[in-house]
Image (spheres, rainbow, N blue to C red):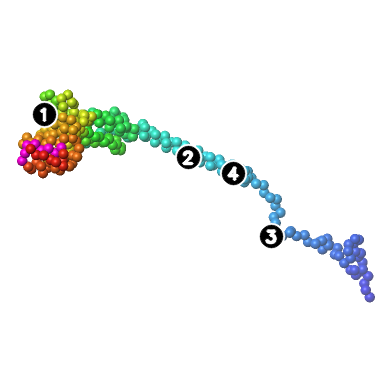
Amino acid sequence: MARSGGPTSGRRPRQGAPEGASTRSGAARPRAGRARDGRGRRPSSRPPRDRGPRDHPALDARNRRHRALRRRITAAVVLLAAVGGLVWLLAFSPVFDVRDVEVTGASPEALPAVRDAAAVPPETSLLWLSTSDLDARVATIPRVASVDVRRSLPGTVTVTVSEREPVAAVPLGPAVALVDDTGFAYRTLPAPPPGIPRLVLPPAVAPSPADPATVAAVRVLGALPPALRRTVTEVRAASAYDVSFTVDGGRTVRWGADGEDERKAAVLGPLLTRPGQTFDVSTPELPVVS
């Protein structure tokens, strides 16, 4: 016989609760759980952290621009300082001042004149020295045929000159004027140097590169072989078309015009081996000995 006080007969189910449901609240509700993402991880329940001022993209870009600007400013300051130092070194520093002027190629007689013409004022920078002006000053010396001025760092100027060589001596009263191979009279001496022939020009004609007779005479001398030229004692140039000269022994050579000089010189050599006093090569195809 069943007991009336059993567990199922003495209690009534709660109103509204489904039949067969447990009376405990935990059993009546499903257990709450966090949703999981696709990797099986539970998302954090913490709210997203606010980005600080340094994490803001606009501020980051501005900071990068500021850093780039500072680098440019620093580079510009360094460049200006370097340029300023270079300008001072080149323009105002005594490092490149001219300290020595060396002269080469000048004879002892011409050396003092060349040194005076090539003098450089004190504190002149080698970098700003005008070599053309120095060249022009030295070239005014009559005995100088050519000049070459060069700079050598840190402070040396080298002046190389080439002096004129005499080919004839023109009588000028009691003295003679030495003439080079261009017809330029550059020096006066009491007498011609040994081995230099006299040059006789028409009256009142001064030797000059602009005078046709002078130019013809020096060209004829330059066309002669060295051995033959050393035997010439006197050259006479009545005009550019009438040149003659005297060789050792008093023999006379009639050259004629300044033309076909090489051919005339080739004919004259064998011709002088013949006996005679006058040798005419003005027409080299028909030389005449008399």
The amino acid pointed to by label 4 is Ala
Amino acid on which the number 3 mark rests in the picture: Arg
* Labels 1 & 2 near each other (Cβ < 8 A): no
The residue indicated by pointer 4 is: 61
Q: For residue 179, which numbered disc appears in the image?
A: none
Circle 2 — which element? helix
Q: CA distance from mark 1 to mark 4?
A: 94 Å
Say what amino acid the circle numbered 2 marks: Ala
Mark 2–mark 3 distance (CA, rounded to whole Å): 52 Å
Under circle 1, the secondary element is loop
Q: Which residue is mark 3?
A: 41
**In 3D space, how far apart are the residues under numbered discs 4 and 2 (Cα atoms)?**
21 Å
Q: Which mark is residue 191?
A: 1
Disc 3 packing (10 Å; few <14; some 14–19; many ≥20): few
Residue linked to disc 2: 75
Mark 1 or 3: the one toward you: 1
Residue 263: which quarter of the image?
top left
For marks 4 and 3, the one nearer the N-term is 3
- Name the residue nearer the viewer: 256 or 25: 256
Q: CA distance from mark 1 to mark 2?
A: 74 Å
Q: Amino acid at mark 1?
A: Ala
Question: Between disc 1 and disc 3, whose residue precedes?
Answer: 3
